[in-house]
Amino acid sequence: MANAQGSQDRSVLYVSATISLAFVAFSMLLPAQMGLAAKSVLGFLTSNFGWMYLLSVFIFTVTVYSIAFSRYGKIKLGKDDEKPEFTDFQWFSMLFGGGMGVGMVFWSVAEPMMHYMSPPVGQGGTVEAMFLAMRIAFNDFGIHVWVIYVICGLALGYFQYRKGLPCMISSAFYPLLGDRIYGPIGKAIDILAVFATIFGVATSLGLGASQIAAGLQYIWGIQSSPGVIAVIIAIMTAIFTFATVSGLHKAMQAVADVKVWLSIAFMVFIFLFGGTVFIMNIFTHALGDYLQNFIGQSLWMGNSSWVEAWPVFYRAWYIAWAAFVGQFIARVSRGRTIREFVLAVTLLPAGFCCVWLAIYGGAAFNLDVMSNGAIQAAVKADYTTSLFVTLKHLPFYVITAPLSIILIVASFVGAANSATYVLSMLTSGGDMEPGKKLRTFWGIAQGAVTIMLILVGGTAALKTLQTASIAAAFPFMIVMVIMCYSIYKALSEENV
């Protein structure tokens, strides 16, 4: 099955770079028109096919767990005698670092509080609304996220490391397309994956930089502006580009370790000083609620406008990230069994995210009561400052405030590392060790795109980019559903 010509093919690089540059150019020249067009397309997709996003992710969930607990679960992502490349802790830290970026920090306080104030059902500001808000947050950042990533990661890891195919998204369709994966159909799949990845990372870079700028203004009074945000983006770009060029075993691993240990330190601190008993009570209740209502909440369409704005939006956003996160987790999981891969990747990071949200959200609820609604007021005024307002109501703010900025940077850099590495793989014909020049190009390109859009159109331009990326997730969602069948077809031919 292996194709030696894959590493020589640069067509995906040239076509995807051209399309991306054209989109950026139009967004800069015609920002209002591009914003309106992107919003219209996304509105059409979410209002008419919101059910499909929810149903597809549910299909992914059934698929990955049925495979994991079947006889195919003992098959390795690699040859039968292959050993894992990374230790368990290194593996976990890179799984979490690659899959969860700045969004976890950005929304850890803001989202639970927003659902608490305006729940999809019932009255806001009540105890019931608080528990419902935490359950919704668990649903948005829990198992569903990682199931989406696992579908891509499982397909890519299996076909690349066990069947010897190139490290390309199109390789997952070999059972259906055969050698046509090297032709126009396969190239179209890979280009779609690259497009979604570029703009998904660019918008996350912009959101992360915006939160850092808001933090600098809130903590030290440094006025936030497009110029300040651009400087922050340039600094973060330099950091993650350097880390990516250094490779998986050097700076990328160091960034992942810093992110995990700093995340744990913040969780312990907030847990101890933010109301330990209150946090444990809300975590216990929300976890039980989440597990009990898992299937019903996975497919709930009771408030269509709210569902489109939150669960559907999140599913689409994660699908837009699925190509690069799936490729990255496959890359660091070589030598693991399918059962080990599925259970570890879906349960460990999801569990970490739920604990994280319970601690941050629980502390925010507790401190909001103690401060007569200060956290709610901050979220209403500017939700990008909600984390800093929460920390201000805790001890040692002079220390935790600057550390929170470092955490935001590390959270984004961890995801950007993996995205840049995978972009280099996808645009070098599947080279597992892409050249440093190509890694440098993609790192600088992502930062440059974001800076240009910020300087020309401000945060509104980033919104257009984000909307376009999520809209691009719709065809990729269909690709992933077909991918499920392709995995089953290939596994059925295994002699186990």
Image (cartoon, rainbow, N blue to C red):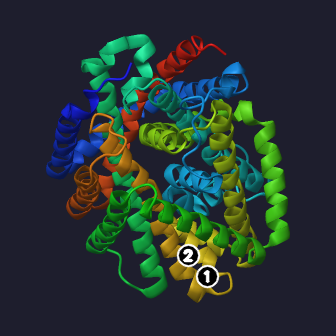
At numbered mark 1, what does the secondary structure look like: helix, strand or loop? helix
Query: What amino acid is found at the position of numbered circle 2 in the picture?
Result: Phe
**Vertical placement of residue 25 versus 387, above or below:** above
Q: Nearer the viewer, residue 152 or 205?
A: 152
Residue 110 image offset from top left, x and y in percent: 58, 61
Where residue 77 sits in the image (x, y, percent)? Answer: 56, 32
Q: Is residue 66 left or right of residue 412?
A: right
- CA gap between label 2 and label 1 equals 6 Å
Q: Which residue is mark 2?
A: 388
Q: Residue furthest front?
A: 81
What is the quadrant of the C terminus in the image? Answer: top right
Disc 2 to disc 1: CB gap under 8 Å: yes
- Residue at (20% x, 35% y) in the render: 10
Residue 123 in view: no
31 displayed left or right of 360: left
The three-letter amino acid code for the residue at tag 1 is Lys
For this rendering, which residue is in front, 143 or 5?
5
Few, some or many residues within 10 Å of mark 1 (<14, 14–19, 20+): some
Q: Answer with the quarter of the image where residue 176 lies.
A: top left
User: Which residue is at a point 44% across and 55% down the rendered structure image?
Assistant: 248
Number of numbered discs present? Answer: 2
Q: Is residue 471 left or right of residue 411?
A: left
**Which mark, by number, is residue 392?**
1
Quadrant of res 9: top left
Q: Position of residue 318 (x, y in %)?
A: 49, 41
The N terminus - image quarter: top left
Q: Is residue 157 visible?
A: yes
Query: Where 35 falls versus 429 (above or below)?
Result: below
Please tell me which residue lies in front, 243 or 192: 243
Residue nearest the viewer, comparing 245 with 153: 245
